Amino acid sequence: MHNIQDDKLNNFGKLGNLAKEFLDYLEIEKGRSHKTIRNYRFYLLRIFSWLAQGEKKLSPTDITLRKIKQFRLWLNRQTDHQGKPLKKTTQNYHLIALRSFLKYLTKQDIKTLSPEKIELAKTPEREVDFLEVDDLQRLLEAPLKDNHPEIIKLRDKAILELLFSTGMRVSELCSLTREHINLKKDEFTIQGKGGKRRIVFLSNQAKYWLKLYLDKRQDMDPALFVRHDRAKSKKEKESDKKIHPLTPRSVERIIKRYSKIAGITKKVTPHTLRHSFATNLLQNGADIRSVQALLGHASITTTQIYTHITNQQLKQIHKYYHGLKKQKNNKD
Protein backbone atom coordinates (compact mmCIF):
# COMPACT_ATOMS: atom_id res chain seq x y z
CA MET A 1 0.00 0.00 0.00
CA HIS A 2 1.36 3.42 -0.95
CA ASN A 3 2.10 5.69 1.98
CA ILE A 4 2.45 9.43 1.50
CA GLN A 5 5.20 9.41 4.13
CA ASP A 6 7.30 7.20 1.83
CA ASP A 7 7.36 10.09 -0.65
CA LYS A 8 9.00 12.16 2.07
CA LEU A 9 11.60 9.43 2.62
CA ASN A 10 12.47 9.68 -1.08
CA ASN A 11 13.73 13.20 -0.40
CA PHE A 12 16.62 11.89 1.68
CA GLY A 13 18.46 10.05 -1.09
CA LYS A 14 20.17 6.74 -0.34
CA LEU A 15 19.31 6.84 3.38
CA GLY A 16 15.63 7.35 2.60
CA ASN A 17 15.60 4.39 0.21
CA LEU A 18 17.28 2.19 2.80
CA ALA A 19 14.71 3.30 5.38
CA LYS A 20 11.89 2.20 3.06
CA GLU A 21 13.57 -1.19 2.64
CA PHE A 22 13.90 -1.39 6.43
CA LEU A 23 10.19 -0.65 6.96
CA ASP A 24 9.28 -3.36 4.42
CA TYR A 25 11.60 -5.72 6.31
CA LEU A 26 9.77 -4.96 9.57
CA GLU A 27 6.44 -5.78 7.97
CA ILE A 28 7.39 -8.87 5.99
CA GLU A 29 10.24 -10.51 7.90
CA LYS A 30 9.57 -9.36 11.47
CA GLY A 31 5.77 -9.26 11.34
CA ARG A 32 5.51 -5.88 13.06
CA SER A 33 2.09 -4.24 13.27
CA HIS A 34 1.07 -1.39 10.98
CA LYS A 35 1.01 0.91 14.00
CA THR A 36 4.62 0.06 14.88
CA ILE A 37 5.75 0.60 11.29
CA ARG A 38 3.90 3.92 11.12
CA ASN A 39 5.57 5.08 14.33
CA TYR A 40 9.05 3.99 13.17
CA ARG A 41 8.52 5.86 9.89
CA PHE A 42 7.55 9.00 11.81
CA TYR A 43 10.59 8.82 14.12
CA LEU A 44 13.03 8.17 11.29
CA LEU A 45 11.59 11.04 9.25
CA ARG A 46 12.07 13.35 12.21
CA ILE A 47 15.69 12.24 12.65
CA PHE A 48 16.47 12.49 8.94
CA SER A 49 14.93 15.95 8.70
CA TRP A 50 17.14 17.15 11.51
CA LEU A 51 20.26 15.49 10.06
CA ALA A 52 19.66 16.89 6.59
CA GLN A 53 19.45 20.52 7.74
CA GLY A 54 17.82 21.44 4.43
CA GLU A 55 20.15 19.49 2.12
CA LYS A 56 17.91 16.41 2.04
CA LYS A 57 20.51 14.06 0.56
CA LEU A 58 21.83 11.65 3.16
CA SER A 59 23.90 8.49 3.23
CA PRO A 60 24.41 5.98 6.09
CA THR A 61 27.79 7.53 6.93
CA ASP A 62 26.03 10.81 7.75
CA ILE A 63 24.74 9.20 10.95
CA THR A 64 27.54 9.91 13.40
CA LEU A 65 27.66 9.75 17.19
CA ARG A 66 28.36 13.48 17.41
CA LYS A 67 25.31 14.33 15.29
CA ILE A 68 23.07 11.97 17.24
CA LYS A 69 24.17 13.61 20.50
CA GLN A 70 23.26 16.99 19.04
CA PHE A 71 19.91 15.62 17.86
CA ARG A 72 19.18 14.29 21.33
CA LEU A 73 19.87 17.71 22.82
CA TRP A 74 17.51 19.29 20.27
CA LEU A 75 14.85 16.64 20.93
CA ASN A 76 15.11 17.14 24.68
CA ARG A 77 14.18 20.81 24.17
CA GLN A 78 11.06 20.07 22.10
CA THR A 79 7.51 20.22 23.46
CA ASP A 80 4.39 18.16 22.84
CA HIS A 81 1.00 19.40 21.60
CA GLN A 82 0.23 20.64 25.12
CA GLY A 83 3.41 22.68 25.30
CA LYS A 84 5.03 20.31 27.80
CA PRO A 85 8.58 18.94 27.41
CA LEU A 86 8.74 15.63 25.56
CA LYS A 87 8.73 12.71 27.97
CA LYS A 88 11.91 10.66 28.20
CA THR A 89 9.98 7.62 27.02
CA THR A 90 8.90 9.50 23.87
CA GLN A 91 12.48 10.59 23.26
CA ASN A 92 13.60 6.99 23.67
CA TYR A 93 11.11 5.82 21.05
CA HIS A 94 13.09 7.87 18.48
CA LEU A 95 16.34 6.24 19.58
CA ILE A 96 14.83 2.73 19.59
CA ALA A 97 13.65 3.22 15.99
CA LEU A 98 17.08 4.51 14.98
CA ARG A 99 18.92 1.65 16.71
CA SER A 100 16.68 -0.88 15.00
CA PHE A 101 17.38 0.79 11.63
CA LEU A 102 21.14 0.79 12.28
CA LYS A 103 21.05 -2.91 13.21
CA TYR A 104 19.33 -3.58 9.89
CA LEU A 105 22.05 -1.64 8.02
CA THR A 106 24.78 -3.52 9.90
CA LYS A 107 23.22 -6.86 8.87
CA GLN A 108 23.33 -5.63 5.28
CA ASP A 109 27.08 -4.90 5.68
CA ILE A 110 26.44 -1.19 5.13
CA LYS A 111 28.93 1.07 6.88
CA THR A 112 27.24 3.30 9.44
CA LEU A 113 27.16 4.12 13.16
CA SER A 114 27.21 1.07 15.43
CA PRO A 115 23.76 0.74 17.08
CA GLU A 116 25.39 -0.25 20.40
CA LYS A 117 26.81 3.26 20.72
CA ILE A 118 23.34 4.76 21.13
CA GLU A 119 22.22 4.57 24.76
CA LEU A 120 18.67 5.24 25.86
CA ALA A 121 17.89 8.02 28.29
CA LYS A 122 17.15 7.00 31.86
CA THR A 123 13.44 7.13 32.57
CA PRO A 124 11.53 7.36 35.85
CA GLU A 125 10.44 3.99 37.20
CA ARG A 126 7.14 3.10 35.61
CA GLU A 127 4.19 3.27 37.97
CA VAL A 128 1.73 0.41 37.90
CA ASP A 129 -1.88 1.12 38.77
CA PHE A 130 -3.78 -1.88 40.02
CA LEU A 131 -6.93 -2.41 42.04
CA GLU A 132 -7.01 -3.62 45.60
CA VAL A 133 -9.29 -6.59 46.28
CA ASP A 134 -12.24 -4.53 47.55
CA ASP A 135 -12.17 -2.11 44.62
CA LEU A 136 -11.79 -4.95 42.16
CA GLN A 137 -14.76 -6.78 43.65
CA ARG A 138 -16.96 -3.68 43.39
CA LEU A 139 -15.89 -3.08 39.79
CA LEU A 140 -16.69 -6.66 38.75
CA GLU A 141 -20.14 -6.39 40.35
CA ALA A 142 -20.94 -2.93 38.93
CA PRO A 143 -22.57 -4.03 35.61
CA LEU A 144 -25.25 -5.96 37.50
CA LYS A 145 -26.18 -2.82 39.43
CA ASP A 146 -26.57 -0.64 36.34
CA ASN A 147 -29.84 0.24 34.59
CA HIS A 148 -28.78 -1.03 31.16
CA PRO A 149 -30.82 -3.72 29.35
CA GLU A 150 -29.93 -7.25 30.41
CA ILE A 151 -27.95 -8.05 27.25
CA ILE A 152 -25.61 -5.11 27.92
CA LYS A 153 -25.25 -6.04 31.59
CA LEU A 154 -24.27 -9.58 30.63
CA ARG A 155 -21.86 -8.38 27.94
CA ASP A 156 -20.12 -5.90 30.22
CA LYS A 157 -19.93 -8.36 33.10
CA ALA A 158 -18.37 -10.93 30.74
CA ILE A 159 -15.85 -8.35 29.50
CA LEU A 160 -14.69 -7.45 33.01
CA GLU A 161 -14.43 -11.08 34.11
CA LEU A 162 -12.55 -12.03 30.94
CA LEU A 163 -10.05 -9.18 31.26
CA PHE A 164 -9.29 -10.06 34.87
CA SER A 165 -9.20 -13.81 34.19
CA THR A 166 -6.75 -13.59 31.28
CA GLY A 167 -4.80 -10.34 31.64
CA MET A 168 -5.46 -9.64 27.97
CA ARG A 169 -4.73 -6.31 26.32
CA VAL A 170 -7.86 -4.47 25.22
CA SER A 171 -6.85 -4.81 21.55
CA GLU A 172 -6.59 -8.58 22.02
CA LEU A 173 -10.03 -8.70 23.64
CA CYS A 174 -11.67 -6.73 20.82
CA SER A 175 -10.17 -8.97 18.14
CA LEU A 176 -11.75 -12.12 19.63
CA THR A 177 -14.42 -14.03 17.75
CA ARG A 178 -16.84 -16.67 19.00
CA GLU A 179 -14.67 -19.32 17.36
CA HIS A 180 -11.80 -18.43 19.72
CA ILE A 181 -13.82 -19.49 22.74
CA ASN A 182 -14.63 -23.08 23.65
CA LEU A 183 -16.58 -22.95 26.90
CA LYS A 184 -15.97 -26.66 27.46
CA LYS A 185 -12.30 -25.84 27.95
CA ASP A 186 -10.55 -23.57 30.42
CA GLU A 187 -8.09 -22.18 27.90
CA PHE A 188 -7.78 -20.74 24.41
CA THR A 189 -5.11 -19.21 22.19
CA ILE A 190 -4.88 -15.54 21.27
CA GLN A 191 -2.60 -13.56 18.99
CA GLY A 192 -0.77 -10.76 20.79
CA LYS A 193 1.77 -8.10 19.88
CA GLY A 194 3.94 -8.86 16.88
CA GLY A 195 1.70 -11.76 15.89
CA LYS A 196 2.93 -13.83 18.85
CA ARG A 197 0.49 -16.46 20.04
CA ARG A 198 -0.04 -17.44 23.66
CA ILE A 199 -2.45 -19.43 25.79
CA VAL A 200 -4.78 -17.67 28.22
CA PHE A 201 -6.96 -19.31 30.85
CA LEU A 202 -10.61 -18.85 31.79
CA SER A 203 -11.79 -18.68 35.36
CA ASN A 204 -15.08 -20.34 36.25
CA GLN A 205 -16.61 -16.88 36.65
CA ALA A 206 -15.48 -15.78 33.19
CA LYS A 207 -16.86 -18.99 31.62
CA TYR A 208 -20.17 -18.59 33.46
CA TRP A 209 -20.81 -15.01 32.37
CA LEU A 210 -19.57 -15.56 28.82
CA LYS A 211 -22.06 -18.41 28.43
CA LEU A 212 -24.94 -16.30 29.75
CA TYR A 213 -24.04 -13.48 27.39
CA LEU A 214 -23.62 -15.66 24.29
CA ASP A 215 -26.84 -17.56 25.04
CA LYS A 216 -28.65 -14.20 25.19
CA ARG A 217 -27.27 -13.06 21.82
CA GLN A 218 -29.70 -13.39 18.91
CA ASP A 219 -27.38 -12.24 16.13
CA MET A 220 -24.98 -14.43 14.17
CA ASP A 221 -22.08 -11.99 14.03
CA PRO A 222 -18.74 -13.75 14.61
CA ALA A 223 -17.35 -11.04 16.93
CA LEU A 224 -17.31 -12.07 20.59
CA PHE A 225 -18.38 -8.66 21.86
CA VAL A 226 -20.64 -6.35 19.87
CA ARG A 227 -22.58 -3.16 20.35
CA HIS A 228 -26.13 -3.42 21.68
CA ASP A 229 -27.44 0.11 21.26
CA ARG A 230 -30.16 0.96 23.73
CA ALA A 231 -32.10 3.20 21.39
CA LYS A 232 -32.09 3.95 17.69
CA SER A 233 -34.49 5.93 15.58
CA LYS A 234 -36.56 3.99 13.05
CA LYS A 235 -34.54 5.56 10.23
CA GLU A 236 -31.27 4.45 11.83
CA LYS A 237 -32.55 0.92 12.34
CA GLU A 238 -33.50 0.61 8.69
CA SER A 239 -30.28 2.11 7.33
CA ASP A 240 -27.84 0.50 9.75
CA LYS A 241 -28.60 -3.15 10.31
CA LYS A 242 -24.95 -4.12 10.46
CA ILE A 243 -23.62 -5.44 13.78
CA HIS A 244 -20.64 -3.46 15.06
CA PRO A 245 -17.94 -5.18 17.14
CA LEU A 246 -16.77 -3.26 20.18
CA THR A 247 -13.65 -1.16 19.70
CA PRO A 248 -10.88 -0.64 22.29
CA ARG A 249 -12.20 2.89 22.80
CA SER A 250 -15.68 1.50 23.53
CA VAL A 251 -14.29 -0.88 26.14
CA GLU A 252 -12.34 1.98 27.75
CA ARG A 253 -15.56 3.97 28.09
CA ILE A 254 -17.38 0.95 29.53
CA ILE A 255 -14.75 0.43 32.22
CA LYS A 256 -14.62 4.13 33.03
CA ARG A 257 -18.39 4.11 33.57
CA TYR A 258 -18.33 1.11 35.92
CA SER A 259 -15.39 2.44 37.91
CA LYS A 260 -17.51 5.48 38.72
CA ILE A 261 -20.49 3.30 39.63
CA ALA A 262 -18.16 1.28 41.89
CA GLY A 263 -17.04 4.47 43.62
CA ILE A 264 -13.40 4.14 42.56
CA THR A 265 -11.84 7.60 42.53
CA LYS A 266 -8.66 6.87 40.56
CA LYS A 267 -8.56 6.39 36.81
CA VAL A 268 -9.34 2.81 35.77
CA THR A 269 -8.62 1.50 32.27
CA PRO A 270 -8.54 -1.94 30.63
CA HIS A 271 -4.80 -1.96 31.34
CA THR A 272 -5.55 -1.48 35.05
CA LEU A 273 -7.22 -4.90 34.97
CA ARG A 274 -4.17 -6.33 33.20
CA HIS A 275 -1.98 -4.88 35.96
CA SER A 276 -4.37 -6.26 38.59
CA PHE A 277 -4.20 -9.71 36.96
CA ALA A 278 -0.37 -9.74 37.13
CA THR A 279 -0.23 -8.33 40.65
CA ASN A 280 -2.77 -10.85 41.90
CA LEU A 281 -0.70 -13.73 40.53
CA LEU A 282 2.54 -12.49 42.09
CA GLN A 283 0.95 -11.76 45.47
CA ASN A 284 -0.43 -15.30 45.53
CA GLY A 285 2.98 -16.83 44.91
CA ALA A 286 3.36 -17.12 41.12
CA ASP A 287 6.92 -16.84 39.82
CA ILE A 288 7.91 -13.94 37.56
CA ARG A 289 8.69 -16.16 34.54
CA SER A 290 5.20 -17.67 34.58
CA VAL A 291 3.63 -14.22 34.80
CA GLN A 292 5.79 -13.11 31.87
CA ALA A 293 4.42 -15.98 29.77
CA LEU A 294 0.81 -15.31 30.79
CA LEU A 295 1.11 -11.61 29.91
CA GLY A 296 2.86 -12.30 26.62
CA HIS A 297 5.87 -10.12 27.42
CA ALA A 298 8.83 -10.64 25.08
CA SER A 299 11.28 -9.53 27.79
CA ILE A 300 11.38 -10.35 31.50
CA THR A 301 12.42 -6.74 32.07
CA THR A 302 8.91 -5.61 31.12
CA THR A 303 7.35 -7.97 33.65
CA GLN A 304 9.67 -6.85 36.44
CA ILE A 305 7.76 -3.57 36.80
CA TYR A 306 5.31 -5.58 38.92
CA THR A 307 7.79 -6.98 41.42
CA HIS A 308 8.01 -3.91 43.66
CA ILE A 309 4.26 -4.19 44.25
CA THR A 310 4.76 -7.49 46.01
CA ASN A 311 7.30 -6.05 48.44
CA GLN A 312 4.71 -6.39 51.20
CA GLN A 313 5.75 -10.04 51.42
CA LEU A 314 9.40 -8.98 51.82
CA LYS A 315 8.31 -6.58 54.54
CA GLN A 316 6.74 -9.44 56.49
CA ILE A 317 9.88 -11.58 56.08
CA HIS A 318 12.05 -8.68 57.29
CA LYS A 319 9.79 -8.05 60.26
CA TYR A 320 9.77 -11.73 61.24
CA TYR A 321 13.46 -12.56 60.84
CA HIS A 322 15.46 -9.34 61.32
CA GLY A 323 16.68 -7.89 64.61
CA LEU A 324 19.36 -8.20 67.31
CA LYS A 325 16.86 -9.49 69.87
CA LYS A 326 16.05 -12.41 67.59
CA GLN A 327 19.72 -13.29 67.36
CA LYS A 328 19.98 -13.24 71.14
CA ASN A 329 16.90 -15.41 71.51
CA ASN A 330 18.30 -17.91 69.02
CA LYS A 331 21.53 -18.17 71.05
CA ASP A 332 19.58 -18.76 74.24
Image (cartoon, rainbow, N blue to C red):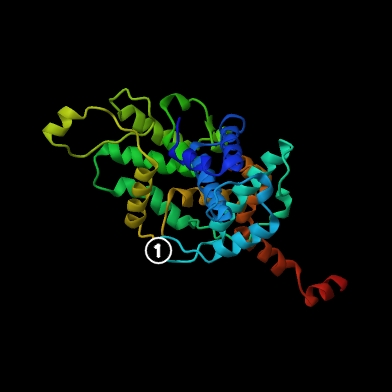
Relative image position of residue 162 (x, y in whole percent): 45, 39
User: Extreme left residue here?
Assistant: 234
Front in this rendered view, residue 309 or 26: 26
User: Extreme right residue here?
Assistant: 331
Front in this rendered view, residue 57 or 21: 57
Judged from the image, the secondary structure of the residue bearing numbered disc 1 is loop
Question: Residue, x 55% and y 38% (percent of image)?
Answer: 193
User: What residue type is disc 1 on?
Assistant: Gln
Q: Which residue is mark 1?
A: 82
Quick check: 212 above or below 311?
A: above
Question: Residue, x 71% and y 63% (percent of image)?
Answer: 317
Question: Residue, x 33% and y 57% (percent of image)?
Answer: 260
Residue 260 horizontal side relative to residue 237, left or right: right
Quick check: 14 above or below 257?
A: above
Total numbered labels: 1
Relative image position of residue 204 (x, y in whole percent): 48, 36
Front in this rendered view, residue 94 or 279: 94
User: Is residue 278 visible to us here?
Assistant: yes
Relative image position of residue 21 (x, y in whole percent): 59, 34
Front in this rendered view, residue 84 or 300: 84
Neighbor class of circle 1 (other Cα within 10 Å; few <14, some 14-19, many 20+) is few
Quick check: 332 above or below 14?
A: below
Find residue 71 and report its image quarter: bottom right
Residue 9 horizontal side relative to residue 325, left or right: left
Which quadrant is home to the N terminus? top left
Question: Residue, x 29% and y 25% (percent of image)?
Answer: 219
Find residue 332 and report its image quarter: bottom right
Residue 279 horizontal side relative to residue 139, left or right: right
Relative image position of residue 2 (x, y in whole percent): 45, 32
User: Is residue 197 visible to us here?
Assistant: no
